Image (tube, rainbow, N blue to C red):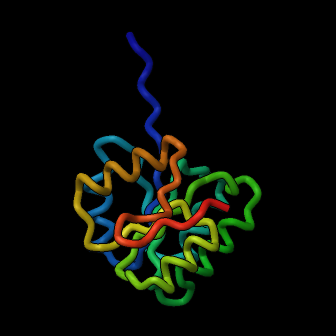
């Protein structure tokens, strides 16, 4: 009898029930998906010892937005190597630049295509950082 394959863990943080259901529905066939409805809930889950392989984080959330949540997660030494990608309806260059400067692994716009989300998640889990999209000019590497 073969051992059960251990699925990679993805934490999705979004205050929208619909967005959580959609993203979880897309990813749950291939990954162990954990959801949180706020930055505070995500931090509570992480404080219990969860070390996800990837975090997908909304920006526009009440109480603690995605920017603050990102910074708090990055302050947890155990999680510093966990890629965090913003999954957001924001699409402006200011937000993209801020995410890039913070060191976000990617900036994925909602609504997203199922195939594109799966492809980006797979690449992020394989260590590829995709902070630049095709809709803006490439920047010189630091």
> Is residue 36 visible in this depiction of the protein?
no
Residue 82, above or below 17: above
Residue 60: % across, % down: 44, 85
> Residue 87 is drawn in which quadrant?
bottom left
Residue 129: % across, % down: 52, 54
Relative to 134, 141 lies left or right: right
Residue 94, above or below 129: below
Quarter of the picture containing the N terminus is: top left
Of 47 and 91, the residue lying toward us: 91
Of 108 and 58, the residue lying toward us: 108
Q: Residue at x 50, y 63 (%)?
A: 131
Relative to 6, 16 lies left or right: left
Residue 9: % across, % down: 48, 47
Q: Residue at x 61, y 50 (%)?
A: 51
Q: Residue at x 55, y 51 (%)?
A: 52
Q: How many marks?
A: 0
Residue 133: % across, % down: 40, 65
> Residue 113 is drawn in which quadrant?
bottom left
Relative to 44, 111 lies left or right: left
Q: Residue at x 59, y 63 (%)?
A: 140
């Amino acid at each position: 009898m073969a051992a059960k394959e251990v699925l990679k863990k993805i934490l999705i943080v979004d205050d929208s029930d619909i967005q959580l259901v959609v993203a979880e529905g897309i990813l749950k066939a291939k990954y162990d998906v954990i959801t949180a409805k706020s930055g505070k809930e995500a931090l509570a889950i992480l404080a219990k010892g969860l070390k996800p392989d990837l975090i997908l984080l909304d920006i526009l959330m009440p109480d603690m937005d995605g920017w603050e949540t990102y910074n708090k997660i990055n302050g947890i030494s155990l999680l510093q190597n966990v890629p965090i990608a913003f999954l957001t309806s924001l699409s402006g260059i200011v937000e993209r630049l801020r995410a890039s400067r913070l060191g976000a692994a990617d900036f994925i716009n909602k609504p997203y295509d199922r195939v594109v989300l799966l492809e980006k998640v797979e690449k992020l889990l394989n260590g590829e950082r995709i902070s630049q999209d095709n809709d803006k000019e490439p920047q010189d590497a630091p």
